[in-house]
Amino acid sequence: MSNNLFKPRIERPSLSQVIDAKAPLFLVPVLMLTGLLAIGSGSTWLTLTAAGFAMGMMIFIMASGLTVIFGLMDVINFGHGAFISLGAFAGFTILGLLGSWIENPGITMNLGAVFLAIAFAMLVTGLAGYGFERLIVKPVYGQHLKQILVTMGGLIVTQQLIYVIWGPDEVVLVRPTAFQGSFVVLGAAVEKYRVLAIAIGLALFVAMRLVLNRTRIGLLVRAGVQNGEMVEALGYQLRKLFLTVFMVGCALAGLGGVMWGMYQETITVHMGAGVMISVFIVVIIGGPGSIEGCFIGAMLVGLLTNYTGFLIPKLALVSTILLMGAVLMWRPQGLYPVVKTH
Amino acid sequence: MSDALLSLNGVHTYIGPYHILQGVDLEVPRGGVTVLLGRNGAGKTTTLRTIIGLWQASQGTIRFDGTEIQKETTPAIARRQIAFVPEDIGIFTDLTVHENILLSARSGAIDEARLGWIFGLFPPLRTFWQSTAGNLSGGQKQMLAVARAIIEPRKLILIDEPTKGLAPAIINAMIAALKELKEMQTTILLVEQNFSMARAVGDTVAVMDDGRVVYSGEMAELAVDKKLQERLMGLSLEAHQ
Protein backbone atom coordinates (compact mmCIF):
# COMPACT_ATOMS: atom_id res chain seq x y z
CA MET A 1 0.00 0.00 0.00
CA SER A 2 1.71 3.14 -1.19
CA ASN A 3 1.35 6.32 0.79
CA ASN A 4 0.73 8.14 -2.48
CA LEU A 5 -2.59 6.41 -2.59
CA PHE A 6 -3.50 8.33 0.54
CA LYS A 7 -2.40 11.73 -0.64
CA PRO A 8 -4.78 13.80 1.48
CA ARG A 9 -7.50 15.47 -0.48
CA ILE A 10 -10.69 17.01 0.72
CA GLU A 11 -13.71 18.14 -1.19
CA ARG A 12 -13.25 21.81 -0.50
CA PRO A 13 -16.37 23.94 -0.94
CA SER A 14 -16.31 26.42 -3.80
CA LEU A 15 -16.39 30.18 -3.19
CA SER A 16 -20.07 30.34 -4.07
CA GLN A 17 -20.77 27.54 -1.55
CA VAL A 18 -18.83 29.41 1.14
CA ILE A 19 -20.75 32.63 0.43
CA ASP A 20 -24.02 30.71 0.41
CA ALA A 21 -23.18 29.15 3.79
CA LYS A 22 -22.32 32.51 5.38
CA ALA A 23 -25.16 34.47 3.77
CA PRO A 24 -27.68 34.01 6.64
CA LEU A 25 -25.24 35.78 8.99
CA PHE A 26 -25.69 38.96 6.99
CA LEU A 27 -29.49 38.93 7.05
CA VAL A 28 -29.83 40.65 10.45
CA PRO A 29 -27.33 43.48 9.66
CA VAL A 30 -28.96 43.96 6.25
CA LEU A 31 -32.41 44.16 7.83
CA MET A 32 -31.13 46.64 10.44
CA LEU A 33 -29.58 48.81 7.75
CA THR A 34 -32.73 48.65 5.64
CA GLY A 35 -34.74 49.61 8.73
CA LEU A 36 -32.46 52.58 9.40
CA LEU A 37 -32.80 53.82 5.83
CA ALA A 38 -36.58 53.35 5.84
CA ILE A 39 -37.17 54.91 9.28
CA GLY A 40 -34.78 57.81 8.88
CA SER A 41 -34.64 58.90 12.52
CA GLY A 42 -31.68 57.35 14.33
CA SER A 43 -33.24 57.51 17.80
CA THR A 44 -36.53 55.97 16.63
CA TRP A 45 -34.59 53.26 14.82
CA LEU A 46 -32.56 52.54 17.95
CA THR A 47 -35.69 52.24 20.09
CA LEU A 48 -37.32 49.91 17.56
CA THR A 49 -34.14 47.89 17.13
CA ALA A 50 -33.78 47.38 20.91
CA ALA A 51 -37.45 46.38 21.07
CA GLY A 52 -36.96 44.05 18.11
CA PHE A 53 -33.95 42.35 19.63
CA ALA A 54 -35.75 41.93 22.97
CA MET A 55 -38.80 40.44 21.27
CA GLY A 56 -36.55 38.28 19.12
CA MET A 57 -34.66 36.99 22.16
CA MET A 58 -37.88 36.01 23.92
CA ILE A 59 -39.14 34.24 20.81
CA PHE A 60 -35.75 32.53 20.54
CA ILE A 61 -36.04 31.31 24.13
CA MET A 62 -39.47 29.85 23.41
CA ALA A 63 -38.49 28.44 19.99
CA SER A 64 -35.09 26.96 20.94
CA GLY A 65 -36.64 24.06 22.83
CA LEU A 66 -39.14 23.39 20.08
CA THR A 67 -36.54 23.36 17.33
CA VAL A 68 -34.35 20.82 19.14
CA ILE A 69 -37.39 18.64 19.86
CA PHE A 70 -38.47 18.96 16.23
CA GLY A 71 -34.98 18.30 14.86
CA LEU A 72 -33.90 15.49 17.15
CA MET A 73 -37.14 13.69 17.84
CA ASP A 74 -39.01 14.52 14.63
CA VAL A 75 -41.93 15.44 16.86
CA ILE A 76 -44.28 18.25 15.91
CA ASN A 77 -45.32 19.42 19.34
CA PHE A 78 -48.38 21.63 19.10
CA GLY A 79 -48.58 21.45 22.87
CA HIS A 80 -45.46 23.60 23.27
CA GLY A 81 -47.61 26.69 23.80
CA ALA A 82 -49.15 25.14 26.90
CA PHE A 83 -45.72 24.99 28.53
CA ILE A 84 -45.20 28.68 27.78
CA SER A 85 -48.45 29.49 29.60
CA LEU A 86 -47.66 27.04 32.40
CA GLY A 87 -44.24 28.61 32.87
CA ALA A 88 -45.75 32.09 33.03
CA PHE A 89 -48.26 31.04 35.71
CA ALA A 90 -45.63 29.16 37.71
CA GLY A 91 -43.37 32.22 37.57
CA PHE A 92 -46.30 34.42 38.60
CA THR A 93 -46.79 32.27 41.70
CA ILE A 94 -43.18 32.77 42.79
CA LEU A 95 -43.19 36.49 42.00
CA GLY A 96 -46.40 36.75 44.05
CA LEU A 97 -44.71 35.08 47.00
CA LEU A 98 -41.70 37.36 46.66
CA GLY A 99 -43.69 40.60 46.63
CA SER A 100 -41.25 42.38 48.92
CA TRP A 101 -38.33 41.37 46.68
CA ILE A 102 -39.86 42.76 43.49
CA GLU A 103 -40.98 45.97 45.22
CA ASN A 104 -37.50 46.51 46.60
CA PRO A 105 -35.66 49.18 44.54
CA GLY A 106 -32.40 47.19 44.68
CA ILE A 107 -31.56 45.34 41.47
CA THR A 108 -30.07 42.38 43.35
CA MET A 109 -33.35 41.52 45.07
CA ASN A 110 -35.22 42.09 41.80
CA LEU A 111 -32.89 39.83 39.87
CA GLY A 112 -33.11 37.24 42.63
CA ALA A 113 -36.91 37.24 42.33
CA VAL A 114 -36.77 36.95 38.55
CA PHE A 115 -34.26 34.10 38.62
CA LEU A 116 -36.18 32.21 41.31
CA ALA A 117 -39.36 32.60 39.25
CA ILE A 118 -37.50 31.35 36.17
CA ALA A 119 -35.99 28.39 38.06
CA PHE A 120 -39.38 27.35 39.46
CA ALA A 121 -41.09 27.77 36.08
CA MET A 122 -38.42 25.64 34.40
CA LEU A 123 -38.72 22.99 37.08
CA VAL A 124 -42.50 22.82 36.76
CA THR A 125 -42.52 22.78 32.96
CA GLY A 126 -39.62 20.32 32.80
CA LEU A 127 -41.49 17.89 35.04
CA ALA A 128 -44.73 18.49 33.14
CA GLY A 129 -42.73 17.77 29.97
CA TYR A 130 -41.72 14.41 31.46
CA GLY A 131 -45.38 13.44 31.89
CA PHE A 132 -46.31 14.85 28.47
CA GLU A 133 -43.61 12.83 26.71
CA ARG A 134 -44.38 9.59 28.53
CA LEU A 135 -48.17 9.79 28.20
CA ILE A 136 -48.77 11.68 24.98
CA VAL A 137 -45.73 11.81 22.71
CA LYS A 138 -44.06 8.42 23.25
CA PRO A 139 -46.87 6.34 21.72
CA VAL A 140 -46.83 8.38 18.50
CA TYR A 141 -43.15 8.66 17.60
CA GLY A 142 -42.79 8.66 13.83
CA GLN A 143 -46.50 9.36 13.22
CA HIS A 144 -46.80 13.03 12.34
CA LEU A 145 -50.56 13.25 11.89
CA LYS A 146 -51.19 11.55 15.22
CA GLN A 147 -48.57 13.80 16.84
CA ILE A 148 -50.46 16.89 15.72
CA LEU A 149 -53.75 15.50 17.02
CA VAL A 150 -52.54 14.24 20.38
CA THR A 151 -50.30 17.22 21.15
CA MET A 152 -53.22 19.53 20.34
CA GLY A 153 -55.25 17.44 22.78
CA GLY A 154 -52.42 17.72 25.30
CA LEU A 155 -52.44 21.48 24.83
CA ILE A 156 -56.15 21.65 25.67
CA VAL A 157 -55.79 19.38 28.70
CA THR A 158 -52.84 21.41 30.03
CA GLN A 159 -54.75 24.65 29.52
CA GLN A 160 -57.68 23.23 31.47
CA LEU A 161 -55.33 22.19 34.28
CA ILE A 162 -54.04 25.78 34.40
CA TYR A 163 -57.67 26.93 34.71
CA VAL A 164 -58.15 24.52 37.59
CA ILE A 165 -55.03 25.69 39.45
CA TRP A 166 -54.89 29.42 38.71
CA GLY A 167 -58.46 30.16 37.59
CA PRO A 168 -59.77 31.46 34.27
CA ASP A 169 -59.00 35.17 34.73
CA GLU A 170 -56.32 37.22 33.11
CA VAL A 171 -53.55 37.86 35.61
CA VAL A 172 -51.37 40.94 35.90
CA LEU A 173 -47.69 40.13 36.16
CA VAL A 174 -45.87 43.05 37.73
CA ARG A 175 -42.29 43.60 36.66
CA PRO A 176 -39.74 44.09 39.44
CA THR A 177 -39.11 47.74 40.25
CA ALA A 178 -35.64 47.87 38.68
CA PHE A 179 -37.05 46.69 35.36
CA GLN A 180 -39.91 49.16 35.11
CA GLY A 181 -39.62 52.24 32.93
CA SER A 182 -36.93 53.07 30.42
CA PHE A 183 -33.68 54.92 30.02
CA VAL A 184 -32.32 57.10 27.25
CA VAL A 185 -29.38 56.04 25.08
CA LEU A 186 -28.27 58.31 22.22
CA GLY A 187 -31.64 60.02 22.34
CA ALA A 188 -33.54 56.75 22.13
CA ALA A 189 -35.82 55.40 24.88
CA VAL A 190 -34.98 51.80 25.73
CA GLU A 191 -37.13 49.86 28.19
CA LYS A 192 -35.06 48.43 31.03
CA TYR A 193 -36.85 45.09 30.89
CA ARG A 194 -35.84 44.67 27.26
CA VAL A 195 -32.18 44.86 28.24
CA LEU A 196 -32.79 42.03 30.72
CA ALA A 197 -34.58 40.00 28.02
CA ILE A 198 -31.69 40.54 25.59
CA ALA A 199 -29.14 39.56 28.25
CA ILE A 200 -30.99 36.36 29.18
CA GLY A 201 -31.59 35.46 25.53
CA LEU A 202 -27.92 35.96 24.66
CA ALA A 203 -26.81 34.01 27.72
CA LEU A 204 -29.11 31.14 26.70
CA PHE A 205 -27.81 31.17 23.13
CA VAL A 206 -24.19 31.05 24.33
CA ALA A 207 -25.00 28.35 26.89
CA MET A 208 -26.83 26.22 24.32
CA ARG A 209 -23.95 26.52 21.87
CA LEU A 210 -21.48 25.57 24.60
CA VAL A 211 -23.53 22.57 25.66
CA LEU A 212 -24.10 21.42 22.09
CA ASN A 213 -20.51 21.94 20.95
CA ARG A 214 -18.44 21.21 24.04
CA THR A 215 -20.20 18.43 25.92
CA ARG A 216 -20.80 14.78 25.24
CA ILE A 217 -24.57 15.12 25.63
CA GLY A 218 -24.45 17.99 23.13
CA LEU A 219 -22.47 15.82 20.75
CA LEU A 220 -25.09 13.10 21.11
CA VAL A 221 -27.91 15.55 20.45
CA ARG A 222 -26.19 16.88 17.32
CA ALA A 223 -25.54 13.35 16.12
CA GLY A 224 -29.08 12.27 17.00
CA VAL A 225 -30.59 15.16 15.05
CA GLN A 226 -28.70 13.92 12.01
CA ASN A 227 -28.98 10.14 12.27
CA GLY A 228 -30.75 8.74 15.31
CA GLU A 229 -30.53 5.17 14.06
CA MET A 230 -26.73 5.30 13.97
CA VAL A 231 -26.59 6.81 17.46
CA GLU A 232 -28.47 3.74 18.68
CA ALA A 233 -26.15 1.44 16.72
CA LEU A 234 -23.26 3.02 18.63
CA GLY A 235 -24.86 1.86 21.86
CA TYR A 236 -26.62 5.01 23.08
CA GLN A 237 -30.21 4.92 24.22
CA LEU A 238 -31.88 7.46 21.98
CA ARG A 239 -35.19 7.23 23.83
CA LYS A 240 -33.55 8.44 27.05
CA LEU A 241 -31.94 11.25 25.08
CA PHE A 242 -35.35 12.07 23.58
CA LEU A 243 -36.89 12.29 27.02
CA THR A 244 -34.11 14.51 28.36
CA VAL A 245 -34.29 16.82 25.36
CA PHE A 246 -38.07 16.98 25.56
CA MET A 247 -37.92 17.96 29.24
CA VAL A 248 -35.27 20.60 28.53
CA GLY A 249 -37.32 21.90 25.59
CA CYS A 250 -40.38 22.24 27.82
CA ALA A 251 -38.30 23.90 30.54
CA LEU A 252 -37.08 26.43 27.98
CA ALA A 253 -40.71 27.07 27.03
CA GLY A 254 -41.33 27.74 30.73
CA LEU A 255 -38.43 30.19 30.82
CA GLY A 256 -39.82 31.88 27.72
CA GLY A 257 -43.24 32.00 29.37
CA VAL A 258 -41.93 33.92 32.38
CA MET A 259 -40.04 36.36 30.15
CA TRP A 260 -42.94 36.80 27.74
CA GLY A 261 -45.40 37.20 30.61
CA MET A 262 -43.33 39.97 32.23
CA TYR A 263 -42.95 41.57 28.80
CA GLN A 264 -46.71 41.58 28.19
CA GLU A 265 -47.42 42.30 31.87
CA THR A 266 -50.57 40.22 31.69
CA ILE A 267 -50.80 36.47 31.40
CA THR A 268 -53.63 34.26 30.22
CA VAL A 269 -53.96 30.57 29.62
CA HIS A 270 -53.95 31.23 25.87
CA MET A 271 -50.82 33.40 25.80
CA GLY A 272 -48.61 30.46 24.81
CA ALA A 273 -50.84 29.31 21.99
CA GLY A 274 -51.01 32.94 20.83
CA VAL A 275 -47.26 33.28 20.41
CA MET A 276 -46.83 29.86 18.81
CA ILE A 277 -47.35 31.20 15.28
CA SER A 278 -44.22 33.33 15.67
CA VAL A 279 -42.41 30.41 17.33
CA PHE A 280 -43.23 28.03 14.47
CA ILE A 281 -42.24 30.66 11.90
CA VAL A 282 -38.87 31.04 13.62
CA VAL A 283 -38.28 27.27 13.73
CA ILE A 284 -39.17 26.93 10.04
CA ILE A 285 -37.05 29.93 8.99
CA GLY A 286 -34.05 28.66 10.95
CA GLY A 287 -34.32 25.05 9.83
CA PRO A 288 -35.69 22.52 12.35
CA GLY A 289 -32.97 21.39 14.74
CA SER A 290 -30.66 24.36 14.17
CA ILE A 291 -29.97 26.61 17.16
CA GLU A 292 -28.03 29.11 15.03
CA GLY A 293 -30.83 29.22 12.45
CA CYS A 294 -33.41 29.60 15.22
CA PHE A 295 -31.46 32.51 16.72
CA ILE A 296 -31.12 34.35 13.40
CA GLY A 297 -34.76 33.63 12.55
CA ALA A 298 -35.93 34.99 15.90
CA MET A 299 -33.91 38.20 15.47
CA LEU A 300 -35.33 38.67 11.97
CA VAL A 301 -38.89 38.15 13.20
CA GLY A 302 -38.42 40.50 16.18
CA LEU A 303 -36.84 43.28 14.16
CA LEU A 304 -39.20 42.98 11.19
CA THR A 305 -42.28 43.03 13.43
CA ASN A 306 -41.13 46.23 15.10
CA TYR A 307 -39.98 47.99 11.92
CA THR A 308 -43.13 47.19 9.97
CA GLY A 309 -45.28 47.96 13.03
CA PHE A 310 -43.85 51.48 12.91
CA LEU A 311 -43.67 51.96 9.14
CA ILE A 312 -46.73 50.09 7.87
CA PRO A 313 -48.80 48.96 10.88
CA LYS A 314 -51.31 47.08 8.72
CA LEU A 315 -48.47 44.94 7.36
CA ALA A 316 -47.02 44.07 10.77
CA LEU A 317 -49.13 40.95 11.24
CA VAL A 318 -48.30 39.40 7.90
CA SER A 319 -44.71 40.63 7.60
CA THR A 320 -43.27 37.59 9.36
CA ILE A 321 -45.28 35.22 7.17
CA LEU A 322 -43.96 37.06 4.10
CA LEU A 323 -40.47 36.77 5.56
CA MET A 324 -40.92 33.02 6.03
CA GLY A 325 -42.16 32.70 2.44
CA ALA A 326 -39.14 34.61 1.14
CA VAL A 327 -36.67 32.55 3.17
CA LEU A 328 -38.26 29.27 2.07
CA MET A 329 -38.13 30.34 -1.58
CA TRP A 330 -34.41 30.96 -1.09
CA ARG A 331 -33.71 27.99 1.17
CA PRO A 332 -36.57 25.48 1.23
CA GLN A 333 -35.07 23.66 4.24
CA GLY A 334 -34.56 26.87 6.27
CA LEU A 335 -31.47 29.01 6.85
CA TYR A 336 -29.36 26.26 8.40
CA PRO A 337 -30.89 22.93 7.49
CA VAL A 338 -29.69 20.06 9.62
CA VAL A 339 -28.66 17.35 7.18
CA LYS A 340 -30.51 14.12 7.89
CA THR A 341 -28.58 11.11 6.76
CA HIS A 342 -31.27 8.49 7.07
CA MET B 1 -17.88 -24.37 12.92
CA SER B 2 -18.54 -25.48 16.45
CA ASP B 3 -17.11 -22.35 18.08
CA ALA B 4 -19.59 -19.86 16.68
CA LEU B 5 -19.60 -16.37 18.17
CA LEU B 6 -22.85 -15.60 16.41
CA SER B 7 -25.52 -17.96 15.20
CA LEU B 8 -28.85 -17.30 13.56
CA ASN B 9 -31.45 -20.04 13.54
CA GLY B 10 -34.61 -19.80 11.44
CA VAL B 11 -34.67 -16.01 11.49
CA HIS B 12 -37.58 -14.30 9.76
CA THR B 13 -37.81 -10.54 9.28
CA TYR B 14 -40.57 -8.45 7.76
CA ILE B 15 -40.14 -4.89 6.54
CA GLY B 16 -43.67 -3.58 6.45
CA PRO B 17 -45.66 -6.16 4.48
CA TYR B 18 -42.56 -7.64 2.83
CA HIS B 19 -41.22 -10.95 4.09
CA ILE B 20 -37.50 -10.38 3.55
CA LEU B 21 -35.71 -12.97 5.69
CA GLN B 22 -37.43 -16.32 5.35
CA GLY B 23 -35.63 -18.54 7.80
CA VAL B 24 -31.96 -17.56 7.86
CA ASP B 25 -29.55 -20.07 9.39
CA LEU B 26 -26.04 -18.73 9.76
CA GLU B 27 -23.01 -19.39 11.92
CA VAL B 28 -20.16 -16.91 12.30
CA PRO B 29 -17.04 -18.58 13.73
CA ARG B 30 -15.10 -16.77 16.42
CA GLY B 31 -12.00 -14.84 15.35
CA GLY B 32 -12.41 -14.96 11.58
CA VAL B 33 -14.02 -13.16 8.68
CA THR B 34 -17.28 -14.54 7.38
CA VAL B 35 -18.37 -13.11 4.05
CA LEU B 36 -22.05 -12.90 3.17
CA LEU B 37 -22.52 -13.07 -0.58
CA GLY B 38 -25.60 -13.00 -2.76
CA ARG B 39 -27.31 -11.06 -5.48
CA ASN B 40 -29.03 -7.74 -4.80
CA GLY B 41 -32.20 -8.19 -2.79
CA ALA B 42 -31.13 -11.57 -1.36
CA GLY B 43 -31.43 -10.27 2.22
CA LYS B 44 -27.78 -9.60 3.16
CA THR B 45 -28.30 -6.05 4.47
CA THR B 46 -31.49 -7.10 6.23
CA THR B 47 -29.56 -9.88 7.95
CA LEU B 48 -27.01 -7.40 9.36
CA ARG B 49 -29.72 -4.92 10.40
CA THR B 50 -31.67 -7.69 12.09
CA ILE B 51 -28.58 -8.82 14.02
CA ILE B 52 -27.96 -5.28 15.31
CA GLY B 53 -31.68 -4.90 16.12
CA LEU B 54 -32.55 -2.11 13.71
CA TRP B 55 -35.18 -4.45 12.35
CA GLN B 56 -36.83 -6.95 14.63
CA ALA B 57 -36.81 -10.65 13.86
CA SER B 58 -40.40 -11.87 13.94
CA GLN B 59 -39.33 -15.47 14.39
CA GLY B 60 -36.18 -17.46 15.11
CA THR B 61 -33.24 -16.93 17.41
CA ILE B 62 -30.05 -14.89 17.23
CA ARG B 63 -27.46 -16.10 19.69
CA PHE B 64 -24.36 -13.99 20.37
CA ASP B 65 -21.61 -15.24 22.66
CA GLY B 66 -24.03 -17.65 24.29
CA THR B 67 -26.91 -15.22 24.80
CA GLU B 68 -30.11 -14.79 22.80
CA ILE B 69 -30.25 -11.20 21.62
CA GLN B 70 -33.11 -11.08 19.13
CA LYS B 71 -35.45 -9.35 21.57
CA GLU B 72 -32.94 -6.78 22.78
CA THR B 73 -32.86 -3.15 21.68
CA THR B 74 -30.20 -1.87 19.30
CA PRO B 75 -28.24 0.01 22.02
CA ALA B 76 -28.25 -3.10 24.23
CA ILE B 77 -26.97 -5.24 21.36
CA ALA B 78 -24.30 -2.68 20.46
CA ARG B 79 -23.16 -2.62 24.08
CA ARG B 80 -22.37 -6.31 23.80
CA GLN B 81 -19.35 -5.06 21.85
CA ILE B 82 -20.89 -5.35 18.43
CA ALA B 83 -20.06 -2.59 15.94
CA PHE B 84 -22.01 -1.88 12.79
CA VAL B 85 -20.86 -0.14 9.62
CA PRO B 86 -23.97 0.34 7.49
CA GLU B 87 -24.17 0.34 3.72
CA ASP B 88 -24.83 4.10 3.66
CA ILE B 89 -21.69 4.60 5.85
CA GLY B 90 -23.74 6.27 8.61
CA ILE B 91 -21.15 8.85 9.63
CA PHE B 92 -22.37 12.13 11.11
CA THR B 93 -21.56 14.55 8.32
CA ASP B 94 -22.13 17.71 10.37
CA LEU B 95 -19.63 16.56 13.02
CA THR B 96 -15.86 16.62 12.67
CA VAL B 97 -13.80 13.48 12.17
CA HIS B 98 -12.65 13.85 15.79
CA GLU B 99 -16.24 14.14 17.06
CA ASN B 100 -17.33 11.09 15.05
CA ILE B 101 -14.56 9.02 16.60
CA LEU B 102 -15.14 10.45 20.07
CA LEU B 103 -18.81 9.50 19.95
CA SER B 104 -17.87 5.94 19.05
CA ALA B 105 -15.54 5.67 22.04
CA ARG B 106 -18.22 4.72 24.51
CA SER B 107 -15.80 4.78 27.41
CA GLY B 108 -15.73 8.56 26.92
CA ALA B 109 -12.06 8.85 25.99
CA ILE B 110 -10.07 7.88 22.93
CA ASP B 111 -7.23 5.39 23.43
CA GLU B 112 -4.28 7.27 21.92
CA ALA B 113 -2.34 4.12 21.07
CA ARG B 114 -5.30 2.64 19.23
CA LEU B 115 -5.92 5.95 17.48
CA GLY B 116 -2.29 5.93 16.31
CA TRP B 117 -2.83 2.45 14.89
CA ILE B 118 -5.96 3.67 13.07
CA PHE B 119 -4.06 6.67 11.69
CA GLY B 120 -1.51 4.18 10.37
CA LEU B 121 -4.28 2.28 8.58
CA PHE B 122 -6.07 5.39 7.34
CA PRO B 123 -3.65 8.38 7.20
CA PRO B 124 -6.21 10.88 5.83
CA LEU B 125 -8.10 10.71 9.12
CA ARG B 126 -5.10 12.29 10.88
CA THR B 127 -4.90 15.02 8.24
CA PHE B 128 -8.58 15.87 8.43
CA TRP B 129 -8.99 15.22 12.16
CA GLN B 130 -10.70 18.57 12.78
CA SER B 131 -12.49 18.76 9.42
CA THR B 132 -16.22 18.33 9.03
CA ALA B 133 -16.88 14.74 8.00
CA GLY B 134 -19.32 15.86 5.30
CA ASN B 135 -16.42 17.45 3.41
CA LEU B 136 -14.45 14.19 3.13
CA SER B 137 -14.32 12.25 -0.11
CA GLY B 138 -16.31 9.02 -0.43
CA GLY B 139 -13.31 6.84 0.37
CA GLN B 140 -12.33 8.94 3.37
CA LYS B 141 -15.90 8.73 4.68
CA GLN B 142 -15.73 4.95 4.43
CA MET B 143 -12.39 4.97 6.27
CA LEU B 144 -14.01 7.04 9.00
CA ALA B 145 -16.95 4.63 9.20
CA VAL B 146 -14.61 1.67 9.69
CA ALA B 147 -12.37 3.63 12.06
CA ARG B 148 -15.40 4.43 14.16
CA ALA B 149 -16.21 0.73 14.42
CA ILE B 150 -12.71 -0.21 15.58
CA ILE B 151 -11.76 2.72 17.84
CA GLU B 152 -12.47 0.41 20.76
CA PRO B 153 -12.00 -3.37 20.77
CA ARG B 154 -15.18 -5.13 19.64
CA LYS B 155 -16.06 -8.79 19.69
CA LEU B 156 -17.95 -8.60 16.41
CA ILE B 157 -17.97 -6.09 13.58
CA LEU B 158 -20.78 -6.08 11.05
CA ILE B 159 -19.72 -4.36 7.84
CA ASP B 160 -22.05 -3.79 4.93
CA GLU B 161 -20.33 -3.38 1.55
CA PRO B 162 -17.37 -1.24 2.61
CA THR B 163 -15.90 -1.12 -0.90
CA LYS B 164 -19.02 -0.01 -2.72
CA GLY B 165 -18.09 2.67 -5.23
CA LEU B 166 -14.53 3.05 -3.94
CA ALA B 167 -11.28 3.40 -5.88
CA PRO B 168 -8.97 0.34 -5.93
CA ALA B 169 -6.43 2.10 -3.70
CA ILE B 170 -9.02 2.60 -0.99
CA ILE B 171 -10.22 -0.99 -1.39
CA ASN B 172 -6.66 -2.17 -0.79
CA ALA B 173 -6.57 -0.06 2.37
CA MET B 174 -9.80 -1.68 3.53
CA ILE B 175 -8.41 -5.14 2.85
CA ALA B 176 -5.28 -4.30 4.86
CA ALA B 177 -7.38 -2.97 7.73
CA LEU B 178 -9.57 -6.08 7.83
CA LYS B 179 -6.54 -8.34 7.71
CA GLU B 180 -5.03 -6.55 10.70
CA LEU B 181 -8.30 -6.87 12.57
CA LYS B 182 -8.34 -10.57 11.74
CA GLU B 183 -4.85 -10.94 13.17
CA MET B 184 -6.18 -9.35 16.35
CA GLN B 185 -8.81 -12.15 16.52
CA THR B 186 -11.70 -9.76 15.87
CA THR B 187 -14.69 -11.54 14.40
CA ILE B 188 -16.11 -9.88 11.29
CA LEU B 189 -19.29 -10.50 9.35
CA LEU B 190 -18.82 -8.82 6.01
CA VAL B 191 -21.38 -8.23 3.30
CA GLU B 192 -19.40 -7.78 0.10
CA GLN B 193 -20.07 -7.77 -3.64
CA ASN B 194 -16.41 -7.32 -4.56
CA PHE B 195 -15.01 -10.82 -4.83
CA SER B 196 -11.36 -9.70 -4.74
CA MET B 197 -12.06 -8.26 -1.34
CA ALA B 198 -14.14 -11.22 -0.23
CA ARG B 199 -11.49 -13.74 -1.27
CA ALA B 200 -8.66 -11.69 0.21
CA VAL B 201 -10.10 -11.51 3.70
CA GLY B 202 -12.76 -14.20 3.97
CA ASP B 203 -12.28 -17.39 5.95
CA THR B 204 -15.81 -18.66 5.66
CA VAL B 205 -18.61 -17.73 3.34
CA ALA B 206 -22.36 -17.87 3.29
CA VAL B 207 -24.39 -17.29 0.14
CA MET B 208 -27.91 -15.91 0.43
CA ASP B 209 -30.80 -16.11 -1.98
CA ASP B 210 -34.46 -15.22 -1.51
CA GLY B 211 -34.04 -14.49 2.18
CA ARG B 212 -32.25 -17.72 3.08
CA VAL B 213 -28.69 -18.94 3.35
CA VAL B 214 -28.35 -21.44 0.50
CA TYR B 215 -24.70 -22.32 0.99
CA SER B 216 -22.14 -22.02 3.72
CA GLY B 217 -18.62 -23.28 3.89
CA GLU B 218 -14.98 -22.37 3.57
CA MET B 219 -14.09 -19.43 1.33
CA ALA B 220 -11.17 -21.34 -0.12
CA GLU B 221 -13.52 -24.05 -1.38
CA LEU B 222 -15.97 -21.68 -3.03
CA ALA B 223 -13.19 -19.55 -4.50
CA VAL B 224 -11.89 -22.42 -6.63
CA ASP B 225 -15.18 -24.09 -7.55
CA LYS B 226 -16.58 -22.16 -10.52
CA LYS B 227 -19.44 -24.60 -11.05
CA LEU B 228 -20.57 -24.08 -7.49
CA GLN B 229 -20.29 -20.33 -7.89
CA GLU B 230 -22.42 -20.41 -11.01
CA ARG B 231 -24.98 -22.69 -9.41
CA LEU B 232 -25.28 -20.47 -6.33
CA MET B 233 -25.05 -17.03 -7.86
CA GLY B 234 -25.71 -17.42 -11.54
CA LEU B 235 -22.19 -16.33 -12.49
CA SER B 236 -18.64 -16.94 -11.48
CA LEU B 237 -17.32 -14.78 -8.67
CA GLU B 238 -14.60 -13.28 -10.86
CA ALA B 239 -17.40 -11.63 -12.81
CA HIS B 240 -18.94 -10.51 -9.55
CA GLN B 241 -16.71 -7.57 -8.75
Image: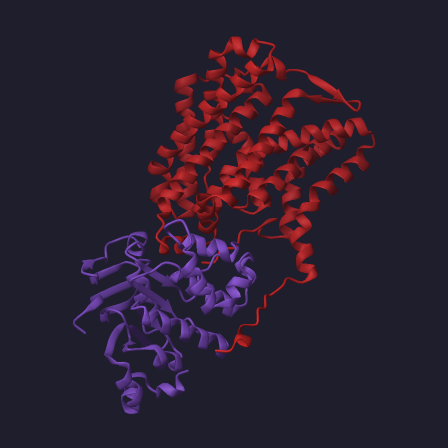
Chain colours: A red, B purple
Q: Can you name the residue that lies furthest to the front here?
A: B113
Among the 4 quarters of the image, the one containing residue A278: top right
Q: Is residue A117 left or right of residue A51?
A: left
Question: Image quadrant of residue B209?
Answer: bottom left
In the image, taking residue A306 as reference, residue B138 lies left or right, namely: left
Asked if residue A54 is positioned above or below residue A102 in the image, the reply reads below
Relative vertical location of residue B215 with respect to residue B99 in this rendering, above or below: below
**Residue B199 in view of the camera:** yes
Residue A105 location, x and y as percent? 61, 10
Residue in front for this viewpoint, A113 or A40: A113
Residue A253 position within the rendered picture, expressed as x and y whole percent measured from the top left: 49, 31
Rendered residue at 33%/36% (across/down): A135
A291 on left or right of A233:
right
Q: Which quadrant would the C terminus of chain A be assigned to in this image?
A: bottom left
| Residue B13 vertical placement versus A288 (above, below) | below
Q: Position of residue A98 (x, y in %)?
A: 49, 12
User: Nearest the camera: B20 or B222?
Assistant: B222
- Measuring 48% from the left and 74% from the top, which residue is drawn there? B170
Q: Residue B27, image x and y in percent?
A: 22, 71
In terms of image quadrants, where is residue B14?
bottom left
At 33% across and 66% down in the image, what residue appears?
A: B158
Q: Is residue A175 visible?
A: no
- Camera-nearest residue between A20 and A257: A20
